[in-house]
Image: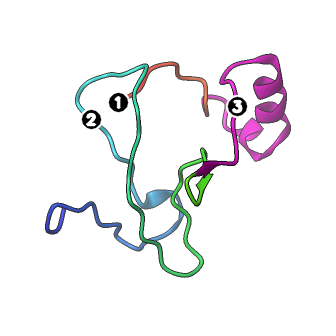
Amino acid sequence: MENGCLIGQGLGGDIGGGIVSENEYDNFILKWDLKLGPNRNSGVIYHVLNGEKVVEFEPWSDDWNKRRNSGKWNEYLGYGRAKKGK
């Protein structure tokens, strides 16, 4: 944290760390302001562009499972499976 902001370490890859709470949630609203440098990725899969939702999906639906299992995440057995998180 710097001046009340979460700051990435700039290390890249999967070693940048996650934002984790001590409590467990299964339904929440995520709202943030994001500032990324060139060639960066927020790691957030749900996208909004200029205030308009441009991607929507229903987690764990047949369509979601088909897409999840047909891409690069198929190699990571637990990815996207948790219905609650911290």
* Label 3 neighbour load within 10 Å: few <14, some 14-19, many 20+: few
Say whether marks 3 and 1 touch (CB < 8 Å). Answer: no
Tell me the distance, in whole angstroms, between the alpha carbons under discs 2 and 1: 5 Å
Query: Badge 2 is on which residue?
Result: 21
Q: Amino acid at mark 3?
A: Phe
The residue stretch that appears in magenta: 52-79
Q: Nearer the viewer, mark 3 or mark 2?
A: 3
Residue 20 is situated, as x and y percent measured from the top left of the image, at 32, 40
Seen in the picture, residue 62 relative to 72 is either above or below; the reply is above
In this rendering, the label closer to the viewer, 3 or 1: 3
Residue 57: give its label: 3
Q: Residues within 10 Å of mark 1 (few under 14, many from 20)?
A: few
Q: Is residue 20 magenta?
A: no
Please tell me whether residue 83 is drawn above or below residue 43 in the rendered image: above
Query: Quarter of the image holding residue 22?
Result: top left
Cα–Cα gap, marks 3 and 2: 24 Å
In the rendering, at what x and y percent does residue 24 appear? 32, 22
Q: Residue furthest front?
A: 51
Q: Residue drawn 67% across and 37% down?
A: 76
Q: Disc 2 or 1, which lies upstream in sequence?
A: 2
What mark, if any, has residue 86 been given in the picture?
1
In this figure, which colouring scheme has been used for the structure?
A: rainbow
Q: Which residue type carries mark 2?
A: Ser
74 relative position to 40: left or right: right
Q: Secondary structure at mark 2?
A: loop
Circle 1 SS class: loop
